[in-house]
Amino acid sequence: ELVSHGIPTEFLDTVERLTKEHYRQCLEQRFKELVASKGLEAVKTEVNDMDWESTFYLRHLPKSNISEAPDLEDQYRNVMKEFALKLEKLAEQLLDLLCENLGLEQGYLKKAFYGTNGPTFGTKVSNYPPCPNPELIKGLRAHTDAGGLILLFQDDKVSGLQLLKDGQWVDVPPMRHSIVINLGDQLEVITNGKYKSVEHRVIAQTDGTRMSIASFYNPGSDAVIYPAPTLVEKEAEEKNQVYPKFVFEDYMKLYAGLKFQAKEPLQF
């Protein structure tokens, strides 16, 4: 949970306020109608094929679609554009810190993500309304993220995010004005397993609506992903290269069908 990220706290407060207003005005009633249509409030057995969340998506790179996104007030639209720019800059700073930690040359990870048209970068805006049966319906089922670096701005009052560590689910407590940093499958591959993508889930709550704004800094669709050669060389005496070479777009096609299954199928 990163607090020294350089994004002004007043700006984060504005992002949170406008996101919550947008949910109440545009999405809350739709979610209630969806729940009613599927009879989810009265379920008696565990639901394994959907999540208790209301979401919409914004794309920033390689080409933004924010101007075409429906139902966004002009102020909210402009704030989310600015937020994306700040997070893009932060993501690139973090990638260089990872390079430093791994002994890779500065810029290696950004270059590995680049592809023909640069990285892909987008945001999933989620709200997790109060749920009458959180033991039967997950806010978001357990999974690892397919991409690279995930920057999450989450609600500081309503909890729910958990990660899997040493076989145990651990709460990620809300921390005001923090950005939670998560690593996806592509960084696990490029670092040859030095960094692991983190399995996580969201537990729905009976009280309060949890806001979650997750921005995904991912490789370009045609980027070729493979372990950094210097990291493979360092481990050559102990073990062979663990991960193969592939095109990110092909990986995403595989991931789409396996996202909520056990992580092992993603281990090639």
Image: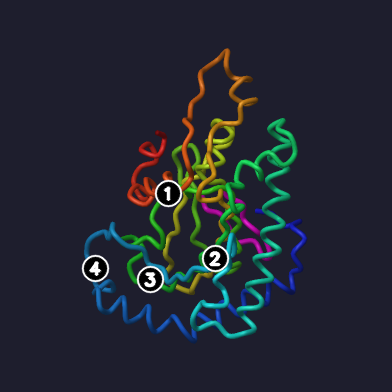
Distance CA(mark 3)–CA(mark 1)? 30 Å
Q: Residue at x 35, y 80 (%)?
A: 32
Q: Is residue 120 above or below residue 156?
A: above
Residue placed under numbered mark 4 in the picture: 43
Left or right: where 4 falls relative to 134: right
Looking at the rendered image, the disc whose residue lies closer to the viewer, 3 or 1, is 1
Under circle 2, the secondary element is: strand
Question: What residue do we see at 42% from left, 72% from top?
Answer: 54
Task: State the extent of the magenta-drawn residues as a range.
Answer: 170-182
At label 4, the amino acid type is Val
Looking at this view, is 243 or 128 the one in front?
243
Q: Can you give x and y, in whole percent of width and height, for residue 97 in the image?
A: 73, 42
The residue pinned by badge 2 equals: 59
Q: Amino acid at mark 1?
A: Met
Quadrant of the rendered structure where residue 251 is?
top left
Residue reaching furthest to the left: 44
The residue that label 1 is drawn on is 252
Q: What's the CA distance linking mark 4 and mark 2? A: 34 Å
Residue 202 at what x, y percent from top left? 45, 58
Q: CA distance from mark 3 to mark 4?
A: 11 Å
Q: Is residue 210 above or below residue 2?
A: below
Q: From the viewer's perspective, is the residue at label 1 or at label 4 nearer?
A: 1
* Closer to viewer: mark 4 or mark 2: 2
The secondary structure that most of the magenta stretch takes on is loop
The three-letter code of the residue at mark 3 reads: Cys
Image x and y of residue 252, in percent = 42, 49
The label shown at residue 34 is none
Q: Amino acid at mark 2?
A: Arg
N-terminal of the two: label 1 or label 4? 4
